[in-house]
C-alpha cells in the first residue's frame, strides 16, 4: 500500500493508499442493507471472498454457461480471482491465478477472435499487461506479459486503431499507451499519447459522433478530465481538458439527460461527489453539475436501477464503505444519494450487471481491505 503522494497517477493506487486518509462523513440518506427508496430497492448485501487487495471488478460469462461471472485482480497477492455465477446471484470462488506484480485492473474481451472470452490484467508494480487467452469452459491459458510503460494501473479494451482487432489502452505517466492487438492475442509495444498529468482512469467511447472511438481520462492530481478525440490514422489528437471537481478517479460515459449526446460522469474521490459533465456532441463539455455521495467515491456506474427508464448513478465509496445510489430524473438531475452498506471494507470499484436473470441490474463491488466482493441484488419493481 502506497502513501497518498505516490498514488495520484493510478486509480487503484488511489484506492489502495487512500484507505489511510481520513474521510469526513457527508450528508446521505442512511438505509439498512435491504433498502427501499425512490423506486430503488436492493436485497441485503451478500459477501464472497476474493483475494487480498481486490481492487477492480468486471462481469463476464467466462465459462459459457450463460451466467455472469465476476473477476477481481488482487493487488496484494499478485493474483486474479474468478467467481463463478450460478444465475441466482450466488458466486463460487475458484483457485486464484498468478498474473504478475500488483494487478490493478482487469478487462474481458475476445483478443484472438475465436469467440471465447480472454482476460487482460494491468500490473502496476511490474508495469506489464498480462493476457490470459480463454480455452473454453472457463479455462485460461498461462498469462503472457507485455511491457506497458510506467504506472500501468488502469486499462480499457477496444478497437481504437480501426483495423478490426481489439487493442489495449493503459494509463501511463502523463500519457496513455495503446498496445495494438494483432488479432491472435498478441500485443504490440505501446504507442503513447499525452493525456494530462498522472492519468487515473480511462474509458473508450465515441464522444463526437464520428464513428471513431475516443478516450476519456481522469486525473485525481489535477481535478480534470481529459478527452482525446480519435484521428483518422489510428491515433488521437492532443487532449482537451475539462474541470471535474477536486480529485476525479472513476469515469463513466452515458447520456444522462437524453439529448442523444454522450455525457461524462466522474467520481470525485476528494470532493465526495459525482461530477456530471454534459456533452455537446462535439467532444466538449462546457457545463457540469455536482451531486454528493458517500466519502471517497472511487468509481461510478450509470444504470437504470429503479426500472423507470431513466439512468441512475451508483458509486463505490471507500471511506464510508458504502454504495451510493442516486436516482435520475432523465434530465441530467439526480436525487439525494441513498447510502447502502457494502458490508465489507473499502469498496474500490463497482459494476452493474444482471446476476440472477430477472431483468434487473444488480450491483457488485470489489472491496480492497476485506479482499472480497459485495453483491446487492436488485429487487425494484420493473415498470412496463
Image (cartoon, rainbow, N blue to C red):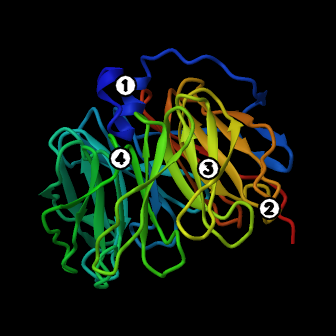
What is the C-alpha distance between the residues marked 4 and 2?
38 Å
Q: First in sequence, mark 1 or 4: give its number.
A: 1
Asked if residue 83 shows in the view, the reply is no
Residue that label 4 marks: 196
Residue at 44% in and 22% down:
19
Residue 59 image point, x, y percent: 47, 59
Residue that label 1 marks: 17
What is the C-alpha distance between the residues marked 1 and 4?
21 Å
Crowd class of label 2 (few under 14; some 14 to 19; many from 20; radius 10 Å): some
Crowd class of label 4 (few under 14; some 14 to 19; many from 20; radius 10 Å): many
Residue that label 2 marks: 307
Q: First in sequence, mark 4 or 2: give its number.
A: 4
Is 39 situated above or below 231?
A: above
Asked if residue 147 shows in the view, the reply is yes
What is the C-alpha distance between the residues marked 3 and 4?
31 Å
Residue at 34% in and 71% down:
137
Residue 153's label in the rendered image is: none
Q: First in sequence, mark 3 or 4: give its number.
A: 4
* Camera-side mark, 1 or 4: 4
Is 257 situated above or below 341?
A: below
Amino acid at each position: 500500500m502506497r502513501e497518498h503522494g505516490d498514488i495520484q497517477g493510478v486509480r487503484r493506487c488511489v484506492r489502495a493508499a487512500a484507505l489511510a486518509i481520513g474521510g469526513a462523513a457527508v450528508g446521505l440518506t442512511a438505509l439498512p442493507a435491504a433498502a427501499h427508496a425512490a423506486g430503488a430497492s436492493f436485497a441485503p448485501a451478500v459477501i464472497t471472498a476474493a483475494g487480498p487487495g481486490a481492487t477492480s471488478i468486471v462481469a463476464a460469462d467466462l465459462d459459457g454457461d450463460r451466467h455472469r461471472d465476476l473477476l477481481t485482480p488482487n493487488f496484494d497477492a499478485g493474483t486474479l480471482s474468478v467467481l463463478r455465477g450460478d444465475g441466482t446471484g450466488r458466486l463460487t470462488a475458484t483457485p486464484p491465478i498468478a498474473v504478475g506484480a500488483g494487478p490493478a485492473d482487469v478487462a474481458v474481451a475476445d483478443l484472438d477472435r475465436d469467440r471465447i472470452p480472454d482476460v487482460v490484467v494491468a500490473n502496476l508494480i511490474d508495469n506489464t499487461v498480462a493476457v490470459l487467452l480463454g480455452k473454453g469452459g472457463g479455462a485460461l491459458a498461462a498469462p503472457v506479459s507485455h511491457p506497458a510503460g510506467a504506472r500501468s494501473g488502469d486499462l480499457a479494451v477496444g478497437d481504437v486503431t480501426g483495423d478490426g482487432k481489439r487493442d489495449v489502452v493503459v494509463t501511463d505517466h502523463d500519457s496513455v499507451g495503446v498496445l495494438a492487438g494483432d488479432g491472435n492475442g498478441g500485443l504490440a509495444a505501446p504507442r503513447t499519447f499525452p493525456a494530462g498529468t498522472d492519468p487515473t482512469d480511462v474509458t473508450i467511447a465515441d464522444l463526437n459522433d464520428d464513428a471513431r472511438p475516443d478516450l476519456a481520462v481522469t486525473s485525481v492530481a489535477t481535478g480534470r478530465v481529459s478527452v482525446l478525440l480519435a484521428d483518422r490514422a489510428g491515433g488521437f489528437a492532443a487532449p482537451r481538458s475539462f474541470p471535474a471537481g477536486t480529485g476525479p478517479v472513476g469515469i463513466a460515459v452515458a447520456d444522462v439527460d437524453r439529448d442523444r449526446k454522450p455525457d461524462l460522469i466522474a467520481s470525485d474521490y476528494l470532493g465526495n461527489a459525482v461530477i456530471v459533465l454534459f456533452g455537446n456532441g462535439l467532444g466538449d463539455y462546457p457545463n457540469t453539475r455536482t451531486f454528493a455521495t458517500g466519502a471517497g467515491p472511487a468509481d461510478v456506474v450509470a444504470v437504470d436501477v429503479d426500472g423507470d427508464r431513466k439512468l441512475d448513478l451508483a458509486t463505490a465509496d471507500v471511506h464510508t464503505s458504502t454504495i451510493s445510489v442516486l436516482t435520475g430524473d432523465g434530465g441530467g438531475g439526480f436525487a439525494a444519494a441513498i447510502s447502502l452498506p457494502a458490508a465489507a471494507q473499502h469498496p474500490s470499484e463497482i459494476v452493474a450487471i444482471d446476476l440472477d436473470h430477472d431483468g434487473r441490474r444488480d450491483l457488485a463491488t470489489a472491496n480492497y481491505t476485506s479482499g472480497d466482493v459485495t453483491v446487492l441484488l436488485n429487487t425494484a419493481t420493473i415498470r412496463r
